[in-house]
Amino acid sequence: MKRFILICAFIAALGASAFAQQSTAFAEKPALVTAIGQSADFEMIKVLLNRAKVPYTADPLVKAEKLDGSAKTLVLVVGASSKGLGAAGISAEAELVRTQALLKKAKELKLSIIVMHVGGAARRGAMSDAFIKPCMEAADFAIVVAAGDEDGLFTDLAAKAKINLAKVDRISSAGAPLAAAFK
Amino acid sequence: MVKQKKLVAVLAVLFLFTTAAHNVFAQASVQDIHGRYLIEHDYRPSSSLARTGWLSDYYPELLGTPGDSKVYYFEGSKPGGTLFVGGGTHANEIAGIMAAVMMIETLNVEAGRVIVVPNMNSSAIGNQEREPELPAYTSRGPSWISIRTSSGIRYFKYGSRATNKAHQGVADPSGGYVHPDSSEAPLAGWEFRNLNRAYPGRSDSGLTQKIAYAVMQLLIKEKVDVAFDYHEADAGGRLANMMVANPKNIETAAGALFDLELDYGLSLKLEPSNMEFRGLSHREWGAGTDAQAFLIETPNPAMVADAPDDVDVVNDPENPLGSRVAKHLYATIAVVRLFSDEHPDKAIRFSGLPGFEDLSDKGLGPYLQ
C-alpha cells in the first residue's frame, strides 16, 4: 500500500512538473516577437531570445498582413503601457484590433504562439487584462512572472486553454523555459 | 574717533561670526578669487583623481553664478571610453548625490575616463525654501544628512528639486512652462526651474537652462560614451526602482537589468524615453550627443506624498540610503560592462567601489573617506 501511495505521488509530481514547465520543445525557429500593449518588457524578451540564441525578428507593432509564414513562432510580450501606447501613437482599442487580427492570421498560418508576461503586477489591470485574455486563448504555451498571477488569472486561462504555463519568480528566470520551448 | 572704533569692533565681530559659522557648517555661499559662486561640499576624492574643473569651463557665462558646479575627472592608465555620472539634478534626491560622492571617494579607473558632477544643480542644493506652488515632496527632508565614517561624522547637504527662484534670473512663466521644442500641454510654471525639463538648455534663458546648456557642452566636448543621471522617486510610486534609457541604447539597458537580477537579485523596471516629452536628460543627451543615456530612479522615503517632515532619509528600514546608492552604482556597473564588451576599443574599466551587499547592508559610512 505504501509503495502504491509513493508511486501515485511520483506520478502526480511528474504531472505537475510537466504542467509547470514545457518539457518538450515544440516551437520552430525563427521567431517573430511583438509587444501586445507596447510595454518596454518587449526589450527584455529580446535580450532573453538573444541569450538563448533563438533567431528572431522583432517588431513591436507588426500587423497581421506582415505575417507571411517566414517566422514559425509568434512570441507575444503582453502587458499594457499607456506611455508606450502613446509613444507608439496607437490607442488601446486599435492595439486590441491589431492583436486579434494577428492571432487570427497566426492560427491560419499554424504558427506556434508563446505568451510572455514578465512585468508582474504593474502590467495587470483592466487594460492589460484585455490583451492577456485573447492572447492566452490562442497560445500554445505561456511564461509568466509569478507576481503577475497573484489572482490566478494566468493559471485559470491556461487551464481553460489546456496549455502549459511556466511560472517563474523573476524575469531573468524566464529564459530557461523560453529556450526550452524551441526545437 | 570713538564711533570709528565701535564700527571696527562691530565689523570684527561680524567677520569672526561669519568665519565661525562657515567652519561649523562646512558650507557657505562664497565667491573664490575667480568670482566663482561656491558651495564648499566636504567631498574627499580618491587618490586616482586626475583633476577637477567646473561646469563653467564649458559655458563661461556660468562663472560666478550659483549654477556653476565642480567637475571631477578620473583617468585610467589605458585608453578607453568616457563615462559621465551626474548626481543632484534634483538636490532632494540624496541617493543620487551620494552615489556620485561614493564614486569620487573610492574610484580607481584602470581604462578610459570617468567624469563625475555630484551636484548638477548647485542652486537647488542650497535651496530648501518651501514654495507654496511646489508640492511638499520637492523640498521635504533634512537640510543635512550625517554619516559616521572612520574619520568621524561627516555632513552632506540636502536640497530641493528646483533652482532657487532668486537665482533663476527670469520669472516662472505665468501661463505654465512649455519646453521651447515641445508641443505638449504646459507644465506648472515652476518646472521652468527644473533642470530635468530644461535640456538641451539655452544660453539666452534662465539659470536652469544655462546649466543644462553647460552639461550638454560637457557631454559633447568630452566625447562622453555613456552618461548617467542619478535620480530618486516616491518610494511607493511607479518610477521607483527604474532605469530609463534612450531608445537608441535600450537594448544595453535591458541586458544590464538581466545581469543585475542574475548577479545581485536586484530587479529594476525598464522604460524607454518618451521622445515626444522634451527636456529630460535621457531623451536630450541621447538625441543631442553621441552618448548612450540612462537615468536611474531609486525609492526615497521623503518623496512619498504624505511622508512626515522628519522622515529619516538615511536609515529608512525599507529603503536605507546604502541600498539606494548600491542600486545606482551597480546599475551603472552593469551598463558599463555591457558597453565595454560591445565596444572593446572604448572599454571603461574601474574598481574600488564597495560590494553591492556590503553597501546595502552596512551603509555608506565604512566606505567614505
Image (cartoon, coloured by chain):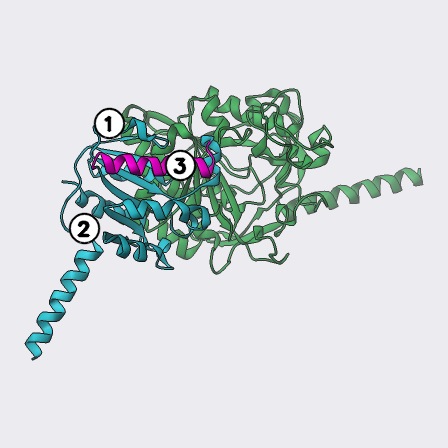
Chain colours: A cyan, B green
- In three-dimensional space, the C-alpha distance between marks 3 and 1, rounded to whole angstroms, equals 19 Å
- In three-dimensional space, the C-alpha distance between marks 1 and 2, rounded to whole angstroms, equals 27 Å
Amino acid type indicated by mark 1: Asp
Depth order, front residue of A15/B84: A15
Q: Picture coordinates of residue B355 (x, y %)?
A: 35, 49
Label 3: element kind: helix
Amino acid type indicated by mark 2: Gln
Instruction: Identify the residue under disc 2.
Output: A22
Label 3 CA crowd tier, 10 Å (few <14, some 14–19, many 20+): few
Q: Which secondary structure type mostly characterizes the magenta part of the structure? A: helix
How many labels sit on residues?
3
Pointer 1 indicates a residue of which chain?
Answer: A
Label 1 CA crowd tier, 10 Å (few <14, some 14–19, many 20+): few
The residue segment tinted magenta is A90-110
Label 1: element kind: loop
Amino acid type indicated by mark 3: Val
The answer to whether residue A100 is magenta is yes
Question: Which of the numbered marks, if any, corresponds to residue A68?
Answer: 1
Q: Residue at x 55, y 45 (%)?
A: B93
Specify the quadrant of the image occupied by residue B120. Answer: top right
Q: Residue at x 24, y 45 (%)?
A: A175
Q: Picture coordinates of residue B360 (x, y %)?
A: 40, 53
Specify the quadrant of the image occupied by residue B81. Answer: top left
Pointer 3 indicates a residue of which chain?
Answer: A
Q: Picture coordinates of residue A135 (x, y %)?
A: 32, 44
Of callouts 3 and 1, the N-terminal one:
1
Of callouts 1 and 2, the N-terminal one:
2
Left or right for B194, reference B357: right
Depth order, front residue of B174/B155: B174
Instruction: Identify the residue under disc 3.
Output: A97
Of callouts 3 and 2, the N-terminal one:
2
Q: Residue at x 20, y 35 (%)?
A: A54
